[in-house]
Amino acid sequence: MKRNDLEYYELNAESWWKEGEALNLSDHFNQTRFEFFNNYIPNWKGIKALDIGCGGGLACEVLAKLGAKVSGIDLSLNSIETAREHARNNGLKIDYQCGAAEDLPYYDNTFDVVLCFDVLEHVGDLKKVLSEAYRVLNKNGIFLFDTINRTFKSKVIMIWLLEDLLRQLPQGLHDWNKFIKPNELSELMESIGFSDIVIKGFDITDGTNFETLKNIVAKGLSNQRQGEKPELFKIQINEDTSVCYIGKTVKR
């Protein structure tokens, strides 16, 4: 089976804004993401923000509605076209471009904030992506991110459970070997010049232990048999980084 299958985004770009579809899960995650990020940016009005790996524009539209001046870039042309059409239909002015995170088509010191959700665990050159984010940020600009830890627990939950068993995520979407330990990411950021790093657990399984994991599996399989939509995960910010984590850092 092909892993880190980025073609999925190109082939399913029309589903970004369809409730119940795998790509639309990002909309569910965004509520908790922005509750966390608002601790560092309480007022987005007038903020110049870039979303790297913006997909169909779900986070970009959140930012635009908050008053930010938003740009979004994604490797998937079909996703960018979906984002442009949805923004146009909703009267939102967002600058979308198709391009690679490793080679951003923006000048140095352009943005106040750069965001990167569900992306770092997919890229070909992590250090280059982080360096590009650093380059396009203004001095004292903030980089906001989330990604997946490389642990046995993350393999069980993100791949064996959510992809292979419950099929709540597309099979082959992730490659466990590309998941990133928090200390690895922090060390790489610091080597580039980032500072003031904060990392918290982005717990998508409601504090999963053995008992709750059994309940998630049982409920998910029951929903599958009955043809029902899977129940969305409860998400909380805590100290458990063993599966997913979220964070911020600053360009000094």
Image: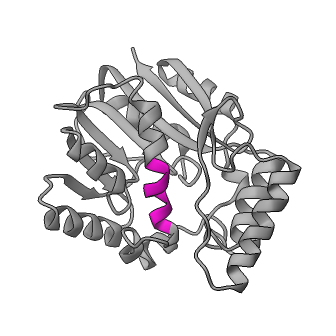
Q: Quadrant of the N terminus?
A: bottom right
- Which region shows up in magenta? 23-30
Query: Observer-nearest residue: 184 or 151?
Result: 151
User: 175 left or right of 86?
Assistant: right
Q: Is residue 56 above or below residue 198?
A: below
Q: Residue at x 53, y 37 (%)?
A: 127
Residue 114: in sight, yes or no? yes
Residue 129: in sight, yes or no? no
* Residue 241 x/y as whole percent: 70, 36
* Residue 245 x/y as whole percent: 62, 38
Tally of marks: 0
Q: Residue at x 18, y 38 (%)?
A: 67
Q: Quadrant of the C terminus?
A: top left
User: 247 left or right of 138?
Assistant: right
Q: Is residue 157 above or below residue 235?
A: below
Q: Is residue 60 above or below residue 229?
A: above
